[in-house]
Image (cartoon, grey):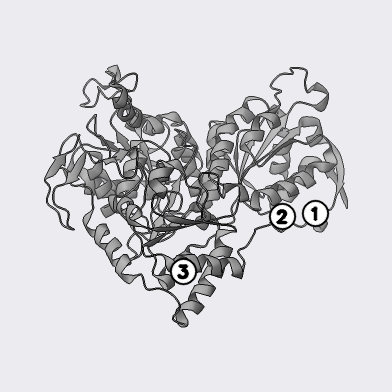
Amino acid sequence: MARMRAVDAAVLVLEKEGISCAFGVPGAAINPFYSALKARGTIRHILARHVEAASHMAEGYTRAKSGNIGLCIGTSGPAGTDMITGLYSAAADSIPILCITGQAPRARLNKEDFQAVDIAAIAAPVAKWAVTVMEPYLVPMALQKAFHLMRSSRPGPVLIDLPVDVQLAEIEFDIDAYEPLVPFKPAMSRDQAEKALKMLNVAEKPVIVAGGGIINADASDLLIEFAEVTGVPVIPTLMGWGAIPDDHRLMAGMCGLQTSHRYGNATMLEADFVFGIGNRWANRHTGSVDVYTRGKKFIHVDIEPTQIGRVFAPDLGVVSDAGAALKMLLDVATEWKTAGKLRDWSVWAGECQGRKKTLKRKTHFDQVPLKPQRVYEEMNKAFGRDTTYVTTIGLSQIAGAQFLHVYKPRNWINCGQAGPLGWTLPAALGVRAADPQRNIVALSGDYDFQFMIEELAAGAQHKLPYIHVVVNNAYLGLIRQAQRGFSMDFEVSLAFENVNRKDDPEAGYGVDHVAVAEAMGCKAVRVRGPEEFAGAFKQAQRLMKEHQVPVVLEFILERVTNISMGTEIDKITEFEELAEHHEDAPTAIVMLD
């Protein structure tokens, strides 16, 4: 037992819980905690330019690698409120991050002190737990509870708020007597697995919907093995993309209103049985429940009891960690197959493969300014199978999900439910901090990129290299496309005549992203025509390796391109569709709108 400040004990606990990197911004009310970080020197700190960005860096760090928990640190008042978007984003996608904030002294709480706000009350709706620790002796135990909660059942974020006098108070603490708590995770029983497989065995056209819970559970290998033993095609959700490689014979495509494949939607509409594992029936995946569920039976496996039946009632619901469920299902399915008790779905799987080969969208366009589809076609050529894509929301993300290819779990790092603009850049920095060797390509529209563009400086300062593809049409493209329903194009254009770009052909596009990136200490390359693609990708990769800073790769797009989407999975508007549906279809298109 040793006597030490509460913050010194806190840092020892963080070390024991596996924390080795933090993202944050220091300030008066959190400086004691920073003094403990400095004294130990064991936790790397990356200085963000905005505390919301620090929270998204922590998200990227967690999402990048199994077992990671990102740590975000800020002072009192606005630092905590800046973290709320990151907490919401993490909670929505079942991502554990730990946010630690400073707070005014206990005697000054509820007295409208400078930068004193009840951050625990503000954060409570978007966190698994949010607490202001009022007793110094409780600081280590509050952290222990935080890590246990973040890792147990459905993962999620926690906020710990530390009044400055609590941080400075001395306590007796023995780190050698401290042990992390074993997380709780429910598991499917054998009886439940047999019941599920009996239901599956009756189906003629079943599919597995693979959600982000499979990624969180590191159960992608189990998913693939279960799919191969049963022969049932897999439809990953956006958060589950990468759980099965895009080119696997049983990968049937994504389903949904926006981030979907034509063949994925077609297969879902044909299916008569859906086995959902680790998914939450998000509305951008399902569209209306009536259309999505028509003519089908459902099994839903999820780690969180309140998810079962939240959107619609399945025919069977099982509360289980996705990995534990897949292990039990695989054991039973293997026994049944060996005994000849498992149905043969090879004809159905062949039909799904047929749709995958024929129902494709056009990508090869030679226009200048560029069409976005061509950019994604070239990205598939330029970046290898091990590339990790990081993105948030907008037409850039929607088109990226329609046209890019993902082959491994955690190689599609996407903010799914919350979708805050500006998320991509700091999240990519967090991914880089988690894995110095990974090939990282971020994808943004111009507006997402501008939201937190200042974090390029953090990437340059801390040597966090990655490639950031910016598709620039000087528009809020997704909102502009949505406004068509109101017959308007109102306050969604980012274009203006930039007086500092008089001799630049893109002066009318407004912001000079290349100049801004270079001013932030990064490198940048602009691409205007198809003949520049190959050289630009190579140049960007060379600059990134040579200078060890983020490299912005900007593509100048035509101002307006409508991307395929719709209001129901059977009513997707294909603005540009292949006239002939076969693997090497010609370039003719049919305008459907």
Q: Secondary structure at mark 1?
A: helix
Q: Which of pointers 3 and 2 lies earlier in the amino acid sequence?
A: 2
The reply to whether dot 1 and dot 2 touch (C-beta < 8 Å) is: yes
In the drawing, does residue 32 fall left or right of residue 86? right
Q: Is residue 345 above or below residue 253?
A: below
Q: Quadrant of the C terminus?
A: top left
Give the camera-side residue of 27 and 233: 233
Q: Which numbered tag is attached to residue 325?
A: none
Query: Residue 358 location, x and y as percent?
Result: 21, 56
- Could you tell me if residue 534 is visible in this image? yes
Check disc 3: other Cα within 10 Å, few if <14, some if 14-19, many if 20+.
many
* Residue 403 pos. (x, y %): 29, 48
Q: In terms of depth relative to the viewer, which is nearer, 472 or 534?
A: 472
| Element under disc 3 | helix
Residue 77 at x, y = what percent?
Answer: 66, 25
Residue bearing the label numbered 3: 226
Q: Nearer the viewer, mark 1 or mark 3?
A: 3
Which disc, if any, is residue 175? 1
Residue 167 lies left or right of residue 566; in this view the side is right
Determine which quarter of the picture holds residue 79. Answer: top right
**Kind of residue sitting beneath label 1:** Ile
Mark 2 lies on residue = 16
Q: Residue at x 45, y 33 (%)?
A: 422
Q: Residues within 10 Å of mark 1 (few under 14, many from 20)?
A: some
User: Label 3 vs label 2: CA separation?
Assistant: 36 Å
Looking at the rendered structure, the kind of residue marked 2 is Lys
Relative image position of residue 6 (x, y in whole percent): 80, 41
Q: Earlier in the sequence, mark 1 or mark 3?
A: 1
In the depicted structure, whether residue 550 falls above or below residue 388: above
Q: What amino acid is labelled 3 in the image?
A: Phe
Badge 1 or badge 2: first in the primary sequence: 2
